[in-house]
Image: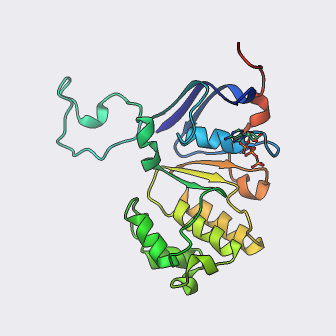
Amino acid sequence: MMITLENAGKRFNRDWIFRSLNYQFTSGKAYAITGNNGSGKSTLLQAIAGATELSEGTMAWTGLTTKATTTATNPNTNLPAQNLPDKATPHEQIHRHLSIVAPYLELIEEMTAREFLDFHKSFKPLLSDYSTIQVLEAVELKTAINKQIRYFSSGMKQRMKLAQGLFTDVPVVLLDEPCTNMDSAGFELYQSLISQFTRQRLVIVSSNDLQEYGFCTEIIDIRDYKKGGLKS
Ligand SMILES: Nc1ncnc2c1ncn2[C@@H]1O[C@H](COP(=O)(O)OP(=O)(O)OP(=O)(O)O)[C@@H](O)[C@H]1O
């Protein structure tokens, strides 16, 4: 699958956050969005997620396969359904195909770790072969399985967010400052999880910290897309 930005721009009031951004993100690759504080990394990530509208240009997700049966055919061509031309996913459905880890997305503090993951998987399945317990084990939170999230430390909450983000069965993983509040063991865990669970997916990391985005092969410096002023 692909995410394509064409002539994309976003502004808040009179300030352009980014502009004239042409870019194609493809499955199986990892991308980093870098830039100083307030430069627009999170804004770009939210635009890619379809959570914020662009002010100009377009953003399209194409090539997402709906699990067609082998007997389904295109009535116009009689070819198997998987040969149908790529159709852009409607923006209101994009959220179904992504997981996002971000400081501004809160956990449900009244729930225990187990309840939270069970609730989450009723909307989006976990990676096959992973039970709630196995996911919590993988992020080293098994001993906190029945603890309410409100009593978690900030680093434990971040591990919980990573569990939700990386173990959800979706093709696109968006990570905004994914190691916020993590200690050195947390960074190591993050890097190990990334190498195990993101290989076949499209991953985009918004960060200034090489420990968070060092595995990415493509770098987008948001400061390269600042040209232009207010169009009148
Ligand atoms: N809803 C909004 N309304 C107005 N301005 C906004 C809004 N959201 C973000 N901004 C502004 O857009 C700019 C980019 O913010 P953004 O959060 O994308 O930056 P960032 O690069 O992710 O920053 P940081 O590294 O500090 O997380 C900032 O100047 C911010 O104040």
Assign ligand 1 to one image quadrant.
top right
Residue 78: x and y, percent?
Answer: 17, 28
67 shown above or below 87: below
Q: Which residue is painted at 59% across and 65% down in the image? A: 161
Q: Is residue 68 visible?
A: yes
Q: Quadrant of residue 46?
A: top right
Is residue 96 or residue 215 the one in the foreground?
A: 96
Q: How many marks?
A: 0
Q: Quadrant of residue 12?
A: top right
Q: Which residue is painted at 59% across and 74% down in the image? A: 139
Q: Is residue 130 visible?
A: no
Residue 26: x and y, percent?
Answer: 54, 39
Q: Quadrant location of the C terminus?
A: top right
Q: Which residue is painted at 45% across and 42% down in the image? A: 94
Q: Quadrant of residue 122?
A: bottom left
Hey, which residue is sitting farthest front in the picture? 13
Is residue 203 or residue 150 the one in the foreground?
A: 150
Residue 69: x and y, percent?
Answer: 22, 46
Query: Is residue 4 toward the left or the right of residue 227 in the image?
Result: left
Is residue 72 or residue 53 the one in the foreground?
A: 53
Hey, which residue is sitting farthest right in the picture? 36
Is residue 128 or residue 178 the one in the foreground?
A: 178
169 shown above or below 83: below
Q: Which residue is painted at 71% across and 15% down in the image? A: 231
161 shown above or below 75: below
Query: Is residue 157 toward the left or the right of residue 123 in the image?
Result: right
User: Which coloring applies here?
Assistant: rainbow
Hey, which residue is sitting farthest top in the picture? 232
Query: Is residue 216 toward the left or the right of residue 50 in the image?
Result: right
Residue 179: x and y, percent?
Answer: 71, 63
